[in-house]
Image (cartoon, grey):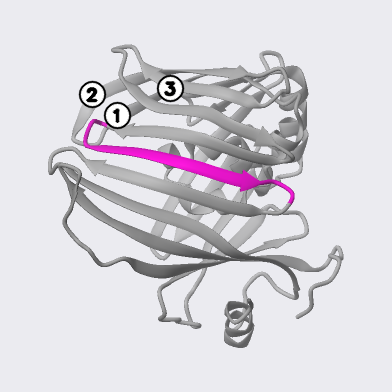
């Protein structure tokens, strides 16, 4: 296994090591646990040359199980629909995507509609719909991965929409049923605003009842480094504020998170800090025990 240029018959492995820094739990702004803990999250993503299939391994803490089976996600083209499948053990999640060239829209699961400008639609239609590039699909869905239970994939995004200043969302519409009231349908309008440099400046996901589910504000954009404040409200049960910073060239990532459990009045604070990002040339999609151990030993 070598860090080499990729050939048409090779596979690419991305290894990411994140430090998870526990900054404590608070009630009424008073810290209720004094001990600061630091854990690790080790992520291995392997994809083929076409990038239509990803095998994903995750390891948390000090215990490493090299016999662990990977999660698997893949893009599958049918006659009328593009399917994105995510499998973990016995769990399977499938989302359906339809591309409409006339309206320059991508519809997901028949209800959620994303309107794009012409240049971004053409790019995704070729890259995702025709060439089945999963990394570009993950990049497209970045802010909505939680809505489709795909958040495990956020660290493998291609980040193309940050690199191309003319890629833009026009607007979007989404629907979702509440987890504790399955007969209650929320309808969401999403607006996107861009600054003069072409960077996403503001995103707001708001319901017809004026509830806000997601708000994203640009704090800084300089030399391929972006910093955003992100607010998420999960049915007024869990409110998460985070500050996310990343560099699209250096593949650096840092996130400071504050999560409030509304009913308990308990706030949890922690930080995700990336310390390792390696790109490795592999021989197969599924890694053997020796390869996994070697990768997890990288620094």
Percent of width and height locating residue 145: 48, 41
What residue sits right under mark 2 in the picture?
A: 184
From the viewer's side, name the closer residue of 256 and 87.
256
What residue sits right under mark 3 in the picture?
A: 205
Percent of width and height locating residue 115: 61, 18
From the viewer's side, name the closer residue of 124 and 109.
124
User: Which residue is at 40% across, 81% downward?
Assistant: 63
Look at the numbered disc 3 and give the secondary structure of its residue. strand
Percent of width and height locating residue 162: 69, 35
Q: What mark, if any, has residue 155 been given in the picture? A: none
| C-alpha distance separating marks 1 and 2 | 6 Å
What residue sits right under mark 1 in the picture?
A: 177
Q: Nearer the viewer, mark 3 or mark 1?
A: 3
Mark 1 / mark 2, whichever is N-terminal:
1
Please say if the residues under marks 1 and 2 sit with CB atoms less than 8 Å apart. yes
Mark 2 / mark 3, whichever is N-terminal:
2
Left or right: where 225 falls relative to 240: right
Percent of width and height locating residue 221: 66, 33
Quadrant, the N terminus? bottom right
Range shown magenta: 235-249
Displayed quadrant of residue 188: top left
Indicate yes or no whether the magenta region holds residue 261.
Answer: no
| C-alpha distance separating marks 2 and 3 | 18 Å
| C-alpha distance separating marks 3 and 1 | 15 Å
């Amino acid at each position: 296994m070598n860090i080499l240029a990729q050939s048409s018959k090779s596979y690419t492995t991305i290894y990411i090591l994140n430090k998870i820094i526990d900054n404590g739990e608070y009630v009424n702004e008073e810290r209720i646990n004094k001990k600061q803990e630091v854990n690790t999250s080790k992520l291995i993503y392997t994809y083929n040359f076409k990038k239509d299939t990803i095998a994903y391994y995750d390891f948390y803490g000090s215990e490493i199980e090299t016999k662990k089976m990977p999660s698997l996600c893949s893009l599958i083209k049918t006659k009328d629909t593009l399917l994105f499948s995510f499998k973990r053990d016995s769990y399977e999640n499938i989302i359906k995507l339809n591309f409409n060239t006339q309206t320059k829209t991508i519809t997901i699961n028949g209800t959620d509609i994303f309107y794009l400008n012409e240049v971004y639609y053409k790019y995704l239609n070729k890259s995702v719909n025709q060439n089945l590039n999963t990394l570009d699909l993950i990049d497209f869905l970045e802010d909505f991965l939680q809505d489709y239970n795909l958040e495990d994939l956020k660290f493998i995004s291609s980040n193309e929409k940050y690199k191309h200043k003319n890629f833009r969302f026009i607007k979007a519409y989404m629907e979702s049923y509440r987890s504790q009231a399955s007969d209650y349908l929320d309808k969401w309008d999403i607006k996107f605003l861009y600054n003069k440099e072409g960077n996403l400046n503001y995103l707001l996901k708001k319901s017809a009842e004026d509830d806000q589910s997601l708000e994203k504000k640009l704090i800084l954009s300089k030399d391929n480094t972006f910093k955003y404040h992100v607010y998420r409200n999960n049915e007024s049960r869990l409110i998460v504020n985070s500050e996310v910073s990343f560099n699209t060239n250096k593949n650096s990532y840092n996130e400071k998170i504050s999560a409030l459990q509304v009913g308990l009045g308990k706030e949890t604070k922690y930080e995700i800090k990336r310390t390792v990002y390696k790109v490795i040339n592999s021989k197969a999609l599924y890694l053997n025990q020796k390869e996994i151990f070697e990768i997890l030993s990288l620094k």
